[in-house]
Amino acid sequence: MKFLLIASYPDSLINFRGALLDALLESGFTVHVAAPNLDIGSCTREQLESKRLHVHNIPLARTSINPFADLKTLVVLWLLMLRIRPSYMLAYTIKPVIYGMLAAKLAGIKHRFALITGLGYAFQGECRSQRSFVRFFVKSLYFLSLRYAHKVLFQNPDDKALFYSVGILKSPTQSCVVNGSGVDIDKYVVSPLPTSPHFLLIARLLGDKGVREYIEAARRVRVIYPEAVFSLVGWIDDNPDAIAEEELAGWINENVVNYLGKMSDVRPAIVASSVYVLPSYREGTPRTVLEAMAMGRAIITTDAPGCRETVVDGDNGFLVPVKTVDELVRAMMLFIEEPGLADRMGARSRQIAEEKYDVHRVNAIMLQEMEI
């Protein structure tokens, strides 16, 4: 049998779905993957082909709302499916889900699945101006396409509840919640904490990731504890909510943050840190938090969908309200002022990662939900 996996980020096929692809191969599937920017000779394509995967480069403009470009994506996916005739298809992130599901229905694919890994720009923040239009557009397309999914998989219960409450999904639609993308607990291993307080945020540089709140909290904490270090890993995205290059340059020149840029392997940054921070407004299940937990780091994150599932407040970290710098500062100060707190909470993070987020357990549940 053939399985087709559709993504919008080519790197995510390795970083987030690598173990799932391995599990599918072990189950006897011929596995095809489709994503943009998988040109012949690219590093990511070579990595995927080395795993015995069939790789397809597709036109997909992730943040564009150009209807002609999106129609091209739909047609290319439809033709691809007619050619390879997969028995199963799974798509994740917004455009692959929408156009992948429509193409699969048109092509007569028997088993069609959607994985909602987060709600993205359209569902974040206040609904006004351009964001209001994008939200209406995305909701309408989700409503149109997900009626053809045999099952919709969510990464947190809040996203699932929202899709039903706004009418994107109707009650007969089969759906379930899985524990994020999981984390390879053999690859992300526990390492000793540094002797001085060192906070870390890894994220695309978007306002909705809470990057500005993190920077402001760093400013306030460093006034009292100048020895505290605040590192930032990430890159400027083409998302409408992206941090401007000038703003990032200002933070670097101010010396408020140690900017490490984009890292293909974030483990060295986590090793250097003592506490991981993600003040995001909403997530599916944040993979970076799971990686930090597996490496024995305490977590500060928001009491927001997707984020709150990763932390038991006061046990393996702290939950703070969205957009509240004061509470973020207070949580950071506790780790500075109470020696041993990061060690104790970090140990609990590792236990939770092993029990709940082991990637092999997560993938086994996904395969079971797809009746594989």
Image (cartoon, grey):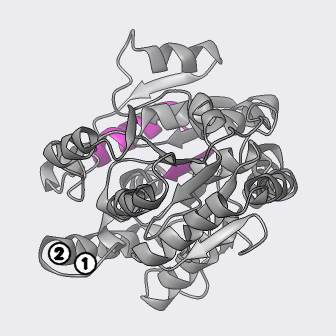
Q: Is residue 306 visible?
A: no
Residue sitting at x 29%, y 47%: 62
| Stretch of the chain drawn in magenta | 73-92
Q: Nearer the viewer, residue 193 or 119?
A: 193
Position of residue 143 measured from the top left corner of the image (x, y, whole percent): 39, 76
How many numbered dots are placed on residues in this image? 2
Quarter location, residue 141: bottom left
Tag 1 and tag 2, C-beta contact below 8 Å: yes
Q: Which residue is mark 2?
A: 133
Say which quadrant the N terminus sits in. top right
SS class, disc 2: helix
User: Given the image, on which type of amino acid does mark 2 rest?
Assistant: Phe
Q: Nearer the viewer, residue 94 or 190?
A: 190
With 204 as the anchor, is 161 left or right in this view?
Answer: right
Q: Nearer the viewer, residue 372 or 267?
A: 267
Residue sitting at x 66%, y 34%: 271
Is 22 rendered above or below residue 69? Answer: above
Q: Which residue is mark 1?
A: 136
Residue sitting at x 25%, y 44%: 254
